[in-house]
Image: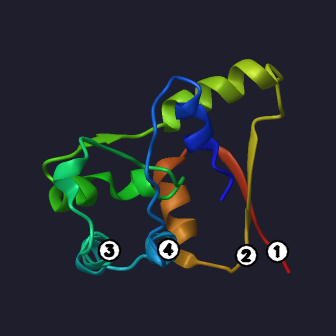
Amino acid sequence: ESEIYQNGFKMIGKEIVTLPIRDLAGAIEFGESDEKVEQIIRDSFNDIDTSEFDTLILGCTHYPLVREIFARTLPALTIFDPATAVALRVATDMNEEGNGVIRFLISKDSEPFRARVDMLLPVSQNEIRVLE
């Protein structure tokens, strides 16, 4: 809803179409099967003529975790993951040093999320807090 991608692309003379994929972030976060994730993606694109598009932007922080499923489900589209560009921009804009602890705030406790953090960041110090 922030329209960050729409505004960014307007600045360079491009127009994009957004498609919220209901339930996908939650399915990823709570460790649903690849088959379930693929079905959610497939269902979301049922009424979309993907031949009118050439690129899919992964506009949610969860989506890169299932990039391969997007690629398999929508093979004709180039997949663009803005995570690296966003991280570089944050590093440039913030330009601050922290204490080396990564803090995650989550709305509901999730063992699959905790396991994924441990898998992706095995040597980092991290703290996961559930918002109440």
> How many residues crowd mark 1 within 10 Å: few (<14), some (14–19), many (20+)?
few
Name the disc covering residue 18, or none: none
Q: Is residue 83 above or below residue 88?
A: below
C-alpha span from label 3 to label 4? 14 Å
The quadrant of the picture occupied by the N terminus is bottom right
* Residue labelled with disc 3: 37
Does label 3 or label 1 sit earlier along the sequence?
3
Q: Amino acid at mark 3?
A: Val
User: Residue at 24% of width from left, 75% of height from top?
Assistant: 46
User: Residue at 52% of width from left, 33% of height from top?
Assistant: 9
Query: Could you say whether the residue bearing mark 3 is in a helix, strand or loop?
Result: helix
Side of 122 where 68 appears, left or right = left
Q: Is residue 91 above or below residue 104?
A: above
**Residue contact between numbered discs 3 and 1, judged by CB atoms under 8 Å:** no
* Residue labelled with disc 2: 107
Name the disc covering residue 131, or none: 1
**Residue contact between numbered discs 2 and 1, judged by CB atoms under 8 Å:** yes
Q: Amino acid at mark 4?
A: Pro
Does label 4 or label 1 sit earlier along the sequence?
4
Query: Could you say whether the residue bearing mark 4 is in a helix, strand or loop?
Result: helix
* Residue labelled with disc 4: 112
Side of 43 where 103 appears, left or right = right
C-alpha span from label 2 to label 3? 21 Å
Query: Could you say whether the residue bearing mark 1 is in a helix, strand or loop?
Result: loop
Q: Is residue 62 above or below residue 55?
A: below
Front of the two marks 3 and 1: 3
**Residue contact between numbered discs 4 and 2, judged by CB atoms under 8 Å:** no
In terms of image quadrants, where is residue 113? bottom right
Query: Could you say whether the residue bearing mark 2 is in a helix, strand or loop?
Result: loop
Does label 3 or label 4 sit earlier along the sequence?
3
